[in-house]
């Protein structure tokens, strides 16, 4: 599974956990809905750290919580 899909799945997981729509997350995080949807559909290759931080803020979680998963822990990074 690629990095974009893992990130999208984590955001989707927290939205479901909080029963929050993507529209509500967009509003709470101040990340435009279009940007959020590009991240969730994996069409954004590398979302910026500030965008991720805003999304975490909207979900009321820390960046550490977002990345604290087995999928991220087992991910191997390739240097291009």
Image (cartoon, rainbow, N blue to C red):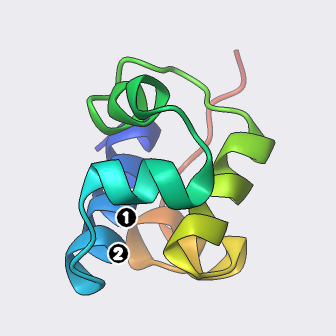
Which quadrant is the C terminus positioned in?
A: top right
Q: Residue at x 30, y 70 (%)?
A: 15
Q: Are marks 2 and 1 in contact (CB under 8 Å)?
A: yes
Query: Which sits in the foreground, 29 or 79?
Result: 29
Name the side, left or right, on which 79 lies relative to 4. Answer: right
In the rendered image, the vertical position of residue 71 relative to residue 16, given as above or below: above
Residue at the spot 51% in from the left edge and 20% down from the top edge: 45
Up/down of 51 relative to 33, above or below: below
* Label 1: which secondary element: helix
Count of numbered circles in the view? 2
In the picture of the structure, the residue carrying the numbered disc 1 is 10
Horizontally, residue 38 falls left or right of residue 12, namely right
Residue 16 is situated, as x and y percent measured from the top left of the image, at 20, 75
Vertical placement of 49 versus 35: above or below? below
Q: Is residue 34 left or right of residue 51?
A: left
Secondary structure category for the residue under label 2: helix
Q: Position of residue 50 (x, y in %)?
A: 79, 44
Q: Which residue is mark 2?
A: 14
Left or right: 8 with respect to 19?
right
Residue 67 % position (x, y)? 57, 70
Location of residue 4 (image quadrant): top left
User: Any mark on residue 48, and which?
Assistant: none
Residue at 39% of width from left, 66% of height from top?
A: 71
Q: Nearer the viewer, residue 78 or 67?
A: 67
Q: Badge 2: few (under 14), some or many (20 or more) residues near its Cα, within 10 Å? A: some
Instruction: Give the residue at x 77% y 44%.
Output: 49
- Separation of residues labelled 2 and 1 (CA atoms): 6 Å
């Amino acid at each position: 599974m690629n990095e974009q899909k893992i990130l999208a799945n984590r955001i989707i997981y927290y939205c479901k956990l909080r029963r929050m729509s993507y529209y509500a997350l967009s509003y709470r995080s101040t990340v435009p809905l279009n940007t959020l949807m590009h991240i969730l559909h994996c069409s954004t290759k590398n979302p910026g750290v500030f965008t991720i931080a805003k999304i975490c803020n909207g979900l009321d979680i820390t960046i550490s919580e977002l990345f604290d998963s087995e999928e991220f822990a087992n991910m191997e990074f390739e240097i291009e």
